[in-house]
Amino acid sequence: MQSKNEQINSLIELNDELENYFRNTIIPQLFVDTQLILRKFTPPAMKQFNLRDEHIGHPFANVKENFRFPTILDNIQHVIDSSEILEKEIQTTDRRWYQMNVLPYIVQKSGKTDGVIITFIDITARIRDLKEQEKLISEHELLLDTIAHDIKNPLTSLGLTIELLKKLPEKGMAKFPVLLSKVEGSLVKMKDIIADLVHNRWQGQRYQAMEELLDLQNILEDVRLTLSAQLQESQAELKVEIGVSEITFARRKLRSILYNLVSNAIKYGAADRVPKILIKSTEQDGYMVISVTDNGIGIDDQHQASIFEKYNRVARTVEGNGVGLYLVRQTLETAGGKITVSSTPGRGSVFSVFLPLAEQPVLD
């Protein structure tokens, strides 16, 4: 058994180790006790959140504004009361985003929570990269779709016109066949260029969307991070119930599908209530069915089919270009799936995405 002096020396050593850790860690960390008093913080926390030595020993409420997150005190109190770990994204006063982890500090001997340790991981770059990816994906897909569909029809019409011109009488039109041949050659060249762009370069390594085994929970986490600013601004409540998690699909395409649906659920929220969004996944007849349910403004029956058409929008007062749901449907139909909608005006909508879990016939 250790003597009293040995116990004191052990405590001093442990305290020195803890102080050394706090001085040298590169992660912003705070220790707040059960009375919501700030007891300790690491140097990075001092830099990122403008904390000073004189804040130690004072109520955390005195510096809560430094974190630009109004419910941080409530979150800390919840962890103290429940001893449950809490994870949230917060934005600081310098507009940086952090993953905030609030962990209960439990005294091993008594098993009681004696405060919380709050850790902040900088995720600003990740959120920025995810948003840029979504923007680039939408732009690339819209460009290729425009080339493949919008330009195809005029080219076909031009080809038919050339065929008609070939049948016209050639009397008095000596140079006409030569000019017609040049126009036809140009038409063929345009078709070849477009075919090369759409089919060959899109299939190349730079743009190819490779299918892989995905965990739906991870994809939803990316979507949540990408939309963190919108979720926080709207105070939307996002709930997830995963019944089926694994799916073989292209990562960027699945992320884009869910991004569009969750983004719309936020944008088309009702003015008189907080947006509530429920995402569920189930298995149905060999398909993963992902449903996104909201309590927004809803869609009239006569507009439910047309919302999947290009440039069609539910409400002109909401920012957007009307291609999101169109691209979602195109992506799903190409993959052998589909999307359906059920909605009640004034109460909300349910969008259901069907993804084949294995080789399936194309859905009608």
Image (cartoon, grey):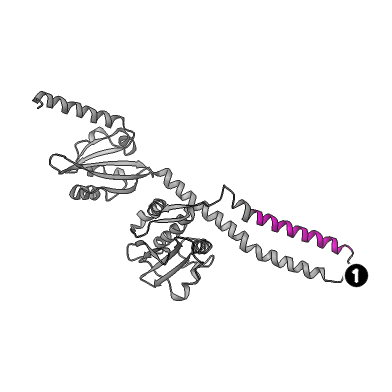
Question: Looking at the picture, does residue 13 appear above or below residue 125?
Answer: above
Q: Could you tell me residue 99's position as x and y percent?
A: 34, 45
Specify the farthest residue to the front: 359
* Range covered by the magenta-colored residues: 174-196
Dot 1 surroundings within 10 Å: few (below 14), some, or many (20 or more)? few
Question: Looking at the picture, does residue 43 appear above or below residue 156?
Answer: above
Specify the farthest residue to the bottom: 302
Q: What residue lies at 45% left-to-right and 62% top-to-bottom?
A: 355
Q: Could you tell me residue 135's position as x and y percent?
A: 50, 52
Residue 181 is inside the magenta segment: yes
Q: Could you tell me residue 167's position as x and y percent?
A: 82, 71
Q: Could you tell me residue 294's position as x and y percent?
A: 36, 65
> What residue sits right under mark 1 in the picture?
171
Q: What residue lies at 20% left-to-right and 29% top-to-bottom?
A: 15
Q: Secondary structure at mark 1?
A: loop
Question: Looking at the picture, does residue 98 appear above or below residue 2?
Answer: below
Question: Looking at the picture, does residue 151 appear above or below residue 60?
Answer: below
Q: Amino acid at mark 1?
A: Lys
Of 298 and 21, which appears nearest the observer? 21
